[in-house]
């Protein structure tokens, strides 16, 4: 559940922008690409909303979040993630808390 935030309000009705950071989300979708790096990886996650619009969401998946699961391209998963601000210049990073096959 995103709440209204302050700052960077240009282009948003009422002058507020949706606040995604520090909230938890869960989506069902398809892994379309993987970029392994050591024990962690970055995945490209394809999500389709109820109206059929498609979104590609980059998600960081740690070994802890993966919990031994082999992640494969073109497979369906349910991913739970948190949007985090890593530092003032790197904001809105999707970090998986769990990933499970569908």
Image: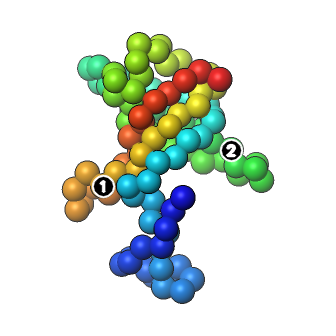
Q: Nearer the viewer, residue 46 or 61?
A: 61
Residue 39, image x, y percentages: 29, 20
Reading the chain from its start, which is encountered first: label 2 or label 1? 2
Is disc 2 placed on a helix, strand or loop? strand
Q: Quadrant of the N terminus?
A: bottom right
Tell me if I can see residue 58 in this picture.
no
| Circles 2 and 1 in contact, beta carbons < 8 Å | no
Q: Quadrant of the C terminus?
A: top right
Crowd tier of the residue under label 2, counting other residues whose Cα lies within 10 Å: few below 14, some 14–19, many 20 or above: some
Q: Residue furthest right?
A: 51
Q: Is residue 78 above or below residue 75?
A: below
Residue 53, image x, y percentages: 71, 51
Circle 2 residue: 48
Residue drawn at (33%, 22%) of the image: 63
Residue drawn at (47%, 13%) of the image: 70
Circle 1 residue: 85
Q: Residue furthest bottom?
A: 14
Q: Which mark is residue 12?
A: none
Give the total of numbered labels: 2
- Using the rendered view, name the quadrant where residue 9 is placed: bottom left
Is disc 1 placed on a helix, strand or loop? loop
Q: CA distance from mark 2 to mark 1?
A: 25 Å
* Left or right of residue 59: residue 102: right
Crowd tier of the residue under label 1, counting other residues whose Cα lies within 10 Å: few below 14, some 14–19, many 20 or above: some
């Amino acid at each position: 559940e995103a709440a209204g935030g302050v700052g960077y309000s240009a282009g948003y009705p009422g002058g507020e922008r949706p606040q995604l950071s520090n909230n938890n989300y869960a989506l069902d979708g398809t892994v379309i690409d993987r970029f392994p790096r050591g024990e962690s990886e970055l995945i490209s996650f394809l999500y389709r909303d109820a109206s059929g619009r498609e979104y590609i969401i980059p998600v960081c998946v740690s070994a802890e979040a993966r919990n031994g699961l082999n992640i494969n391209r073109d497979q369906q998963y349910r991913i739970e993630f948190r949007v985090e601000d890593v530092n003032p210049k790197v904001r809105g990073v999707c970090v998986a808390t769990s990933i499970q096959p569908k």
